[in-house]
Image (cartoon, rainbow, N blue to C red):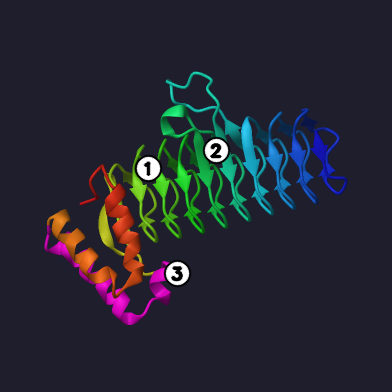
Amino acid sequence: MLISTSATISASSIIESDVMIGPQVVIGPFCVISAGVQIGEGTIISSHTVITGNTKIGSYNQIGMGSSIGEISQDLKYAGEAAGLEIGNRNRIGRHATLHRGTAQGGGLTRIGDDNNFERGVHIGHDCQVGNATFIGENSGLAGHVVLGDESQIDAMCAVHQFCIIGTGARLLAGSCVVQDVPPYVQAGGNRASPQGINERADAFRQAEPAVREVIHYLYDLLYHQQAAIEKVRLEIARLSAEYPLLCHFNEFFLRSARGIVR
């Protein structure tokens, strides 16, 4: 056990052996921190939170009360094999969140990046790969193996099917059910989700040069107004990528996409 002398831990919390708790960490009342957990500097754990398994939490995160972090997978094939959860830095995780560790079938690791904001009741299933600066609204959930790109936004009460990819800067409107992949910077909504235009609120889109924004609108037009074949769209992305580096997000998306895209 390695606990920094500057950490503050409530007397009512249970800290098992073989944990690492960094400087200035605050652990509130009635928490349980299981063996093998690592918590980085300045992270705040609110009351009644359970953190278990091979879970590594970075620095300056905030975890809301009543959360379950690093519990075993809900995948019925899980048989106790080694698996983990990694959380980066400066994430805000709302109360009653459930974040699960990975499985052998998914590489053994659920990974969450930096500067994400998850509101109350968010669920992140096994083997999900969450990027940086994302937002997930209240009571929304990602099933297993979901990939969530940087700066993407999921509004409240959304459900994302397993193995789906939500591209960089994409947005899901409240109450959406997503069963196919959502390309970068596309806004989608409904049950089942369908495209609803460009997410012009994404930081990278807003900060891009006007010509880049026009190209993204052009690609959207190809996909959804002209109903072009995916291969034609990929060729256009390849042609334009040399001049517009932001299109690398589209290249990566279409290389990985296997479920088809929202239509």
Left or right: residue 123 compared with residue 242: right
| Label 2 element class | strand
* Quadrant housing the N terminus: top right
Check disc 2: other Cα within 10 Å, few if <14, some if 14-19, many if 20+.
many
Q: Which sits in the foreground, 201 or 216? A: 216
Q: Which residue is disc 1 drawn over? A: 160
Residues in magenta, as a range: 201-228
Residue 156 place in picture, x, y as percent:
45, 50
Q: What's the distance in space between the residues labelled 3 and 1, CA to CA?
A: 23 Å
Left or right: residue 62 compared with residue 221: right
Left or right: residue 142 compared with residue 176: right
Q: Which residue is disc 2 drawn over? A: 99
Which residue is found at the position 71% from the left and 48% from the top?
40
Left or right: residue 105 compared with residue 238: right
Instruction: Residue 231: give its label.
Output: none
Q: Are marks 1 and 2 in contact (CB under 8 Å)?
A: no
Q: What's the distance in space between the residues labelled 1 and 2, CA to CA?
A: 15 Å
- Give the total number of marks visible in the rendering: 3
| Label 1 element class | strand
Q: Which residue is disc 3 drawn over? A: 203
